[in-house]
Image (cartoon, helix red, strand yellow):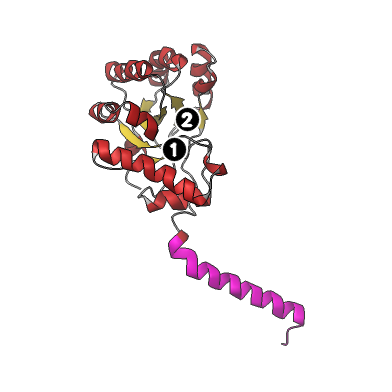
Amino acid sequence: MSLNRRQLFQAGALAAAASFIDLNTAENSQAAQIDITHGSRSSKNVALTFHGAGDPANAHALLKIFADTKTPVTVFAIGTWLKANPTFAKLILAGGHDIGNHTLNHYEMKTLSAKKVDSEIAGCAAELKKQIGYAGSWFRASGTQYATPLIRKAAAKYGYNHCISYEVDSKDYLNPGKAAVISNTMAGIQNGSIVSLHFGHKNTVEALPALIEKLHANGFTPVTLTTLLGKI
């Protein structure tokens, strides 16, 4: 059966696209993965994840709450914050928590050039290596809930094969008050949830003891991302 000119053009375009995909599949396979927003729905484990920056007094208060309540968490540290507070990375690890890369300066990653995206991830990775000997277990893009293919590709270059997002937003960064931080979190929590919280807000410190108690009362167990997700 013969093809008309339009059909021949479409066939050629499809072949060219397939060839392009074949050439780039290996290079971009990691970058093409979507962000992780939750873990397994089969258990009642949840991950409390914190954007690591802000007043050191809040960070110390939260670390004490974690210790007192035996609550392991994951902290996505900002590189400039680590530089200004060089004891925190080791304190976080010593408490049995996970630590990850939240970029060097916490810019809005989607607005940056490829070169700047690379340097933001590399800068925080280098600071983590300097302080704890490795680049951290996880990566979360700054200034956006979800990474882009460009960001994912850059993250994979530095060993972060997955970008971590979240499905529950406590909205503690809005300073809505203790009760709102708790209700915002509990309204969306389910098996395997990853929750977004922040070190730099007093409301978070005030809410955490009651929030942790409420999670346990509802059968949920806070764990690190490593426990929630395993080695992926």
Name which residue lies at 38% across and 14% down. 209
Q: Exactly how many numbered labels are in the figure?
A: 2
Earlier-in-chain disc, 1 versus 2? 1
Name which residue lies at 46% across and 29% down. 196
Residue receiving disc 1? 41
Q: Nearer the viewer, residue 137 or 200?
A: 200
Is residue 44 in view from this perspective?
A: no
Residue 142 in picture, x, y percent from top left: 48, 37
Q: State the SS at label 1.
A: loop
Q: Main secondary structure of the magenta part?
A: helix
Mark 2 is on which residue type? Gln
Residue 38 in picture, x, y percent from top left: 45, 38
Q: Is residue 113 above or below residue 105?
A: below
- Tell me where the magenta segment starts and ends, as one range: 1-27
Q: CA distance from mark 1 to mark 2?
A: 8 Å
The label number, if any, that marks residue 187 in the structure image: none
Residue receiving disc 2? 190
For label 1, the crowd category at 10 Å Cα-Cα, with few meaning under 14, some 14 to 19 and many 20 or more, is few
Q: Are marks 1 and 2 in contact (CB under 8 Å)?
A: yes
Q: Is residue 46 above or below residue 110?
A: above
Q: Is residue 209 magenta?
A: no
